[in-house]
Each structure stands twice: as structure tokens, then as C-alpha cells.
């Protein structure tokens, strides 16, 4: 493959070229039109204004992924139909690729077409609030069904460079096994979430050749675990001692975690690596809140353990959980001179009875409830009515430290969720509302 291949590239875009940073091609490569530019573009005074030309190289197909795929097939099979190798580079919202035109992509392989498909704004990252068009987390799976498609989910720019270089070699260079190049095409997911791009690792074991081999294989060690010694070297709990056969073979008593990630998720994997290193060093998770469901909320030992670590719990509890509005008086009954001397604290005679949290909720006046937004969901904001008040929970028939009782009521069905939290007395309701939506996400809060 010769060095002067620029004129053989065919950038193809169905919509939003500027979203993908392709407007830099407008004034140079220009947009192909068989009639040239027959109008004055509204952005004609801009440096990167819209430019059409009979000799344009960029195919801007309008909002038609099917039409764009037709252009990909025409360019990708031009070596057979016209005896001229072209290199289509089709950039599109990844959600509108294999999911919308997968049959045409499969047909591209059947027609022995070659080229690049770039699924942009892939992953489920910072744009999910705009809708499902930014919620692709499955196109890699769909692409895997085509034997002609070579797919990658790169995280870094240097990985894309390595993959692209090898792809051009495989598709367009002659080899002993493939004298006319391989009849394959490539699907790469790319992202528009801005994050710093590191340089290619200069100290990779085995050098650049080994790194490139790992990238093309699809799996390589990007970041080795730091050697972190735990404070005071505490003993590893017995239930953790032999969870890994590899750990046993290496003579290490503690398990080893292998974090596997690709694409934009690799940055979260690196964060997870730092968090795990901190856990090993301190033997504690770095968090302020512990959010749990009813199975934990109804376990006094769990709640006392969390509080004993200096953490705040926010746990769902059963509607039958009993509380007092005010701390009842207690005492140790006087010894009457017979039997064993009393040592256990008891409620004083005439102390008010504790009520269930369901009874407390039913007795609240209407003005005690406020409408709050819990979080943004896939179908819009999650909204419910909330009330919060300080109570004293019952523990072994005696009062425990004062806690928050948080009540969450569904707007339509009035279904009630009840929570207890040992958060400080000055904790804002908005904070506790947010905690009520944190039951399932794995987050350090």
C-alpha cells in the first residue's frame, strides 16, 4: 500500500457532521455534490463553513443511515466493480448502526466490502439524559455476529492508531495468504466524552511490538496494581483466604482482582483500581453513606456495626418497625431485697407505647409532605412525596439513639417506603431524598 492514499478515503456521514468534529473537512475536502454548491450557506463567513463541490470528498447523506450504508457498500466494493480501492470511513451514532441497519452491514460482508464503520457517541456515559440515541452498550455484541466484521472498543487514541494501521494493512496490502488483501471490514466504537489522552506507554514489557500485539489481540495489561501494604498488616479473614486458585499457587493468602474494561469504561476501571488499593491499605472502604434494603435495615447488629465505623446508614425498614416520637424515660428497677439485684434497664411505668412507622406516617398532616425529585430516570424525573422527622427506634424493647425516619410516598398509588438513617440532625431533606434513590447503583456516596 503506497503512502499517497489520502484521495482514496471516503468520509461518510448521515447527520451531525459537526457533532463528530468533521466540519474541519468542509473547507478542504469539501462535501460532494454533482452540481457543486448552488446556494450561499448560512455559515459561509465561518472558517469551517459548509462547502459543496463537484470534486468533494465527503459524502453528507442527510438523515438516512440506509443511504449512507449504500454509499459505504459502493465505496467498499469499488475494488471489484471499478478496479479501484476506496476506503470508506462511515461515522454515525452507534445506536443507529447495527441496531438500525444491521442487515446492510451484514450484506457489506457478504459483498466482500472493506472499510471502517465508526460508531460514535457509544457507551452509556455522560449523554444518557438526551435519550436512547446515546445509550448504546450493546453494538459490540451485535457486530460480533458477522464473521467479516473485526470490532474493537478502544479507550485511547494510540489504540485507534494501532488498530487503523493494522486494518489498512490487512484490507489493502498483499500478503502470501491474501494476495488481494482480506475481505473484512472494521467496526470501532468511539466516544465524545472529553477526557485526557495519554501517550503510548513507553515502558511496556516487551516494547512497542508487544504493546501493539496486545492491542490487536484485544487484551493487554494497561495498569499494573501498585504494591500497597495494608496498615499494620492485619490478618486476612478466613473467608477471604483461599478464594483464588491462582492466589494459592502463588503462595499469596489474599485474593487478586483482575479488572477488565474497554472503551470509556477504562477510566472507571482505573478509578476502581485506586479504590481497591486504598481498601487494601486501610482495610476500609472510603465512603460516608451505606445504603441498604430492608433485609439489612431490619438487622440491628448491621446498623450498629455501620454506626460503630463512624458511617451513616440509610436503610429501608419494614412498616412494622416501631419508634417513639420522644425518648421515653428508662430506669433500673430498685432491688426489693429478694432474688437477684436488677441490672437491666427498663422503661418506667406509664411510658408511652411505641408506634409503627406506618402509623406515624398515617398520622402526619398534609403539610408535612413535600414533593421532591429523586433523580433523573430514563423516562424522565423520578418524583415522590417525602416527609422526614426525628424518632427514637426500639431496640430490644428499649430506646436507641435518635435517628431520622424518612417516608417516601408514591404520587399515584400512595405506596409507602420507610427508611431509618443515623445521619446528623442537620442533614438536609434533599440529601436524604437522593439517598433513597441510591439503593441499586454501586457508588461511593
Image (cartoon, rainbow, N blue to C red):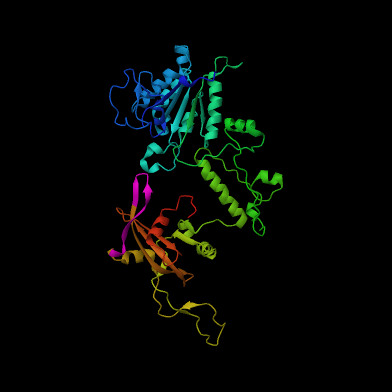
227 versus 417 height, above or below: above
Quadrant that contains the N terminus: top right
- Residue at position x 63%, y 32% in the image: 208
379 within the magenta span: yes
Which residue is more in the foreground, 399 or 432? 432
Is there any visible trace of residue 298 in the rendered image?
no
Is there any visible trace of residue 66 in the rendered image?
yes
Left or right, 397 with respect to 202, comes to left
Residue 134 in which image quadrant: top left
Residue 117 horizontal/vertical position (percent): 46, 27
Main SS of residues in magenta: strand
Which residue is more in the foreground, 367 or 427? 427
202 versus 318 height, above or below: above
120 within the magenta span: no
Residue 141 horizontal/vertical position (percent): 48, 32
Which residue is more in the foreground, 270 or 316? 270
In the image as oriented, which residue stretches furthest toward the bottom? 337
- Residue at position x 55%, y 79% in the image: 343
Report the magenta residues as a range. 367-382
Which residue is more in the foreground, 161 or 64? 161
Residue 341 horizontal/vertical position (percent): 56, 83
Left or right, 340 with respect to 92, comes to right
- Residue at position x 51%, y 64% in the image: 307
Left or right, 284 with respect to 83, comes to right
Amino acid at each position: 500500500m503506497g503512502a499517497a492514499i489520502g484521495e482514496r478515503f471516503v468520509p461518510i456521514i448521515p447527520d451531525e457532521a459537526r457533532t463528530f468534529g468533521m466540519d474541519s473537512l468542509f473547507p478542504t475536502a469539501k462535501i460532494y455534490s454533482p452540481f457543486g454548491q448552488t446556494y450561499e450557506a448560512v455559515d459561509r463567513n465561518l472558517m469551517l463553513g459548509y462547502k459543496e463541490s463537484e470534486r468533494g470528498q465527503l459524502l453528507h447523506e442527510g438523515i438516512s443511515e440506509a443511504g449512507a450504508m449504500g454509499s459505504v457498500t459502493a465505496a467498499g466494493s469499488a475494488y471489484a466493480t471499478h478496479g479501484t480501492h476506496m476506503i470508506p470511513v462511515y461515522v454515525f451514532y452507534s445506536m443507529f448502526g447495527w441496531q438500525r441497519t444491521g442487515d446492510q452491514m451484514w450484506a457489506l460482508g457478504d459483498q466482500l466490502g472493506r472499510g471502517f464503520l465508526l460508531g460514535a457517541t457509544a457507551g452509556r456515559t455522560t449523554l444518557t439524559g438526551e435519550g436512547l440515541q446515546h445509550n448504546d452498550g450493546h453494538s459490540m455484541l451485535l457486530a460480533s455476529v458477522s464473521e467479516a466484521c473485526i470490532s474493537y472498543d478502544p479507550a485511547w487514541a494510540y489504540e485507534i492508531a494501532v488498530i487503523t494501521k493494522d486494518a489498512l494493512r490487512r484490507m489493502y496490502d498483499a500478503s502470501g495468504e491474501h494476495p488481494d488483501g482480506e475481505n473484512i471490514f472494521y467496526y470501532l466504537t468511539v466516544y465524545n466524552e472529553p477526557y485526557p489522552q495519554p501517550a503510548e506507554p513507553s515502558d511496556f514489557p516487551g516494547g512497542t511490538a508487544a504493546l501493539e500485539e496486545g492491542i490487536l489481540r484485544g487484551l493487554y495489561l494497561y495498569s499494573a496494581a501498585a504494591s500497597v501494604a495494608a496498615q499494620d498488616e492485619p490478618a486476612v479473614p478466613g473467608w477471604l483466604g483461599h478464594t483464588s486458585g491462582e492466589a494459592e499457587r502463588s503462595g499469596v493468602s489474599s485474593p487478586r482482582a483482575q479488572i477488565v474494561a474497554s472503551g470509556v469504561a477504562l477510566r472507571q476501571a482505573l478509578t476502581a483500581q485506586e479504590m481497591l488499593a486504598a481498601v487494601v491499605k486501610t482495610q476500609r472502604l472510603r465512603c460516608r453513606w451505606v445504603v441498604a434494603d430492608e433485609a439489612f435495615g431490619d438487622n440491628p447488629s448491621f446498623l450498629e456495626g455501620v454506626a460503630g465505623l463512624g458511617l451513616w446508614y440509610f436503610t429501608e425498614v419494614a412498616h412494622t418497625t416501631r419508634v417513639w416520637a420522644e425518648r421515653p424515660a428508662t430506669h433500673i428497677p430498685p432491688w426489693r431485697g429478694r432474688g437477684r439485684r436488677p441490672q437491666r434497664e427498663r422503661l418506667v411505668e406509664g411510658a408511652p407505647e411505641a408506634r409503627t412507622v406506618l402509623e406515624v406516617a398515617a398520622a402526619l398532616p398534609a403539610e408535612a409532605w413535600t414533593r421532591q425529585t429523586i433523580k433523573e430516570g430514563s423516562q424522565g424525573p423520578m418524583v415522590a412525596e417525602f416527609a422526614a422527622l426525628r424518632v427514637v427506634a426500639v431496640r430490644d424493647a428499649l430506646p436507641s439513639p435518635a435517628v431520622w425516619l424518612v417516608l417516601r410516598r408514591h404520587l399515584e398509588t400512595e405506596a409507602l417506603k420507610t427508611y431509618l438513617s443515623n445521619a446528623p440532625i442537620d442533614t438536609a431533606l434533599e440529601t436524604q431524598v437522593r439517598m433513597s434513590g441510591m439503593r441499586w447503583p454501586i457508588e461511593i456516596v
